[in-house]
Image (cartoon, grey):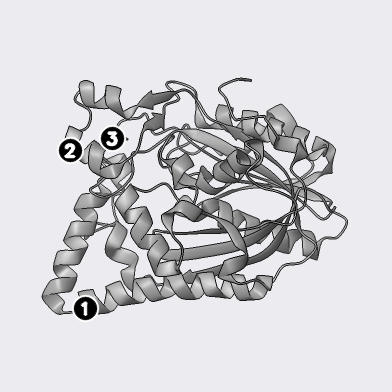
Amino acid sequence: MRIRDIYLAGIGVFLPTTQSIGSAVEQGLVPAGTAADYGLSGVAVAGRTAAPEMALAAAQEALKNSGTSAEDIGLLLYTGVWHQGPDGWGPQAYLQRHLLGDDLLAIEVRNGCNGTFGALELAAGYLKAFPHVPAALVTASDNFGTPLIDRWNPGDGVAYLGDGASAVVVSTTPGGAELRSLCSATFSAMEEAHRGGEPLFPPGATTATDLDYGARGAAFQRAAEEDGSWVRLLLGHQRHNVVCTEQALEEAGVTADDITHVLIHGMPRRAAASYLKILGFPLERSTWDFSRTVGHLGASDHMAALHHLLATERLHAGDHVLLCGFSPGVTYKAAVVRVLGTDPTRKREAQASGV
């Protein structure tokens, strides 16, 4: 989708204290060989700080950085990967009560670790459809320190899971960064890749079934190899990644050479390098050097990385960055953002405060 006159006015991030991979190895949480192969150095661990509390802190920072008041927010989209709180309860209402008030549309969006992309796409369309609404707020937050998932062993080849939150104010007023394109694709033939033959009912969370993406993926691959579809599916997966990214570049009016940084999901080093190679970028042009210090932050990877680049003065006005990734579905997302200014987040790294 070609986008014009939609801006990322302010970004906020909450990252708790990180636990080093070395200490995780010493505690027997991960094998030393796997840790060395993955190349990660640390994982953000929130302890008992709830995901909505982290989202609130990130949202407060995003509003402050944007210069936008809570009264200007006409849409709240809250996304996350893992459970947010009591079943049957909506975490978006927590941000309404403690920050935004009731006079807006507030919805929880579930789109896996591509949730922020999906929310941005919805926010852009909403702001265009309702020009009297000046801004929207997109938040993402997760705390993986719960039963039924092991942050240190989410599945073979999946990065260790880090806790944290991000928020971005999406506005029609110029400032911060301009969203130039946002593209989506789906390869539903691989829908089963992230459930691996597990039953649809009853839901695993209601039967105390652990989530192991590695076991599910292995079961899916075995079945696809047996019926002869594996190579076709693998090539289709790669093609969807490339086509989605190329479309985002084209609709933004730039080429790969114009991209200063590629922002990706948290992945082990080998997986990140392979993914970027398919897209035509070296690992060194990505934000893997940041993600390796905090782990895979669910739906917050890209906004946390963008915040980090701005705060450490690695971006300048006029730079273009590419945000891309894939998640269960299988869905593919890619966006191009042009930086307009860096002052709001300069030298203000995310830290565990405000909760």
Q: Are marks 2 and 1 in contact (CB under 8 Å)?
A: no
Amino acid carrying label 3: it is: Trp
Quarter of the image with the N terminus is: bottom right
Q: Using a 10 Å C-alpha cutoff, classify the residue at mark 3 as few (fewer than 14 neighbours), some (14 to 19) or many (20 or more).
A: some
Q: Are marks 3 and 2 in contact (CB under 8 Å)?
A: no
Label 3, label 2: how many angstroms apart (C-alpha)? 13 Å
| Camera-side residue of 39 and 223 | 39
Q: Name the residue furthest right.
A: 132
Give x and y (percent) for residue 228.
16, 79
Task: Give the residue at x 19% y 33%.
Answer: 32
Helix, strand or loop at mark 1: loop
Disc nearer the start of the sequence (1/3): 3
Q: Is residue 258 above or below residue 313?
A: below
Q: Is residue 288 above or below residue 239?
A: above
| Camera-side residue of 237 and 39 | 39
Q: Nearer the viewer, mark 3 or mark 2?
A: 2
Task: Give the residue at x 34% y 61%.
Answer: 274
Quarter of the image with the C terminus is: top right
Helix, strand or loop at mark 3: loop
Give x and y (percent) for residue 78.
59, 44
| 143 sits left or right of 54 in the view | left
Q: Which residue is mark 3?
A: 152
Q: On the image, which quarter does residue 12 sit in?
A: top right
Task: Give the residue at x 37% y 71%.
Answer: 238
Disc nearer the start of the sequence (2/1): 2
Q: On the image, which quarter does residue 96 sit in?
A: top right
Q: Which mark is residue 229?
A: 1
